[in-house]
Amino acid sequence: MKKYNVAILGATGAVGQEFLSLIEERNFPFANLKLLASKRSAGKVIKFMGKDYVVEEATNESFKDVQIALFAGGSASTVFASAAVKSGAVVIDNSSAFRMDPEVPLVVPEVNPEAIKNHKGIIANPNCSTIIMTMALKPIYDKVKIKRVVVSTYQAVSGGGKEAIDELEQQVKAIAENRPVEAKILPGASLAKHYQIAFNLIPQIDVFKDNGYTKEEMKMIDETHKILDDYGMGITATTIRVPVYRSHAESINLELEDDLSIDEVKSALSNFEGVIVKDNPDEMEYPMPLYTSNQDEVFIGRIRKDYSIKNGLNLWVVGDQIRKGAALNALQIAEYMIKHNMF
């Protein structure tokens, strides 16, 4: 099998580290591997597949001879994407920078792989919550058009970075030891106020827009329209940070154009690549973040009719937002391109 020169930008962060785990797990065909990060992280040594790799400071020259550039996200994407493309690399980017650019495909490989062929050097990875939701919507959408989506998310603190994970741990410990609780990170480190996340929920992820929605909520709405290429579908979202370490959960209510039986819904979901139906009320079986973490699939349960509206449907959807919601989805894009000789 042909092997490819790969660069990971943001190699020392959570998504970058997940890239490395997945490359090894999935036997991704790389020849040479460059680990790139900020000046602060340059010089760190990462042991990977029996070899020591020295993290390099990312520069515009870092992408020479690189064919696949996996960008873990953040502001570095806008700084280095054009240089990587000019060097001949295909950039698969986890940041939000290019997602709504009409020239850039926004791709979930199981949902809209046909969009990949339209790339001009950059392919965008959707928001983690959008990926998880569209994996649930697509098999239903292929059966019956969806009129309206109402989604509430329950998003793990790891979506806010390592600092948010550390803060949850510190707050739980402080409460257990009857010490004052400090909040410095959530809902966002750069925001004017911070709230305790331990034993609490915070109904704000990212900043508020003029329409009263948060940026995260609008990402889910706008990105889903683009991925499904259906701008007439009604979508409303409420995104909530919860004191869970890993895996996002979503309560999704759908209004369909026509009726689908529960058996038809379960069959469509079960036969969709990357989805596992875990739905057995008699045995109290349903997806939970504790058990979906470090899993590649999106898990769906609590599948039932919504009798308050015609053709209504309820779903409970859970997925690992660092895997399928970020690193895995990006790597699957690269794998699809390799399989279809697109490099």
Image: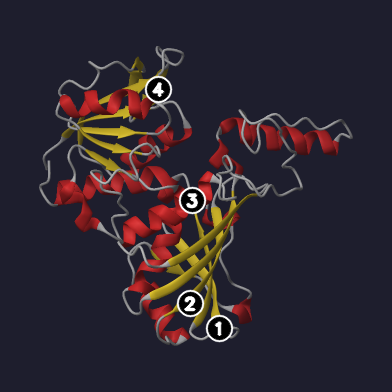
Q: Are marks 1 and 2 in contact (CB under 8 Å)?
A: yes
**Which is closer to the viewer, label 2 or label 4?**
2
Name the residue that disc number 1 marks.
Answer: 309
Give the image location of residue 6, x and y in percent: 23, 31
- Please tell me which of labels 1 and 4 falls first in the chain: 4
The answer to whether any part of residue 121 appears in the image is: yes
Q: CA distance from mark 2 to mark 4?
A: 48 Å
Q: Is residue 343 above or below residue 250?
A: above
Q: Quadrant of the N terminus?
A: top left
Q: Are marks 3 and 4 in contact (CB under 8 Å)?
A: no
Nearest the viewer among 139 and 257 is: 257
**Which is closer to the viewer, label 3 or label 4?**
3
| Amino acid type, residue under disc 2 in the picture | Glu
Q: CA distance from mark 3 to mark 1?
A: 25 Å
Q: Residue at x 75, y 39 (%)?
A: 196
- Please tell me which of labels 3 and 1 falls first in the chain: 3
Give me the disc on residue 84: none
The answer to whether any part of residue 32 appears in the image is: no
Q: Residue furthest right?
A: 178
Name the residue that disc number 2 marks.
Answer: 255
Q: CA distance from mark 1 to mark 4?
A: 54 Å
Describe the element under mark 1 as helix, strand or loop. loop
| Amino acid type, residue under disc 4 in the picture | Ile
| Amino acid type, residue under disc 3 in the picture | Met
Q: CA distance from mark 1 to mark 2?
A: 7 Å
Name the residue that disc number 4 marks.
Answer: 46
- Crowdedness of circle 3 by 10 Å Cα count: few (<14), some, many (20+)? some
Quarter-of-image position of residue 237? bottom right
Give the image location of residue 252, x and y in percent: 53, 67
- Please tell me which of labels 3 and 2 falls first in the chain: 3
Describe the element under mark 3 as helix, strand or loop. helix
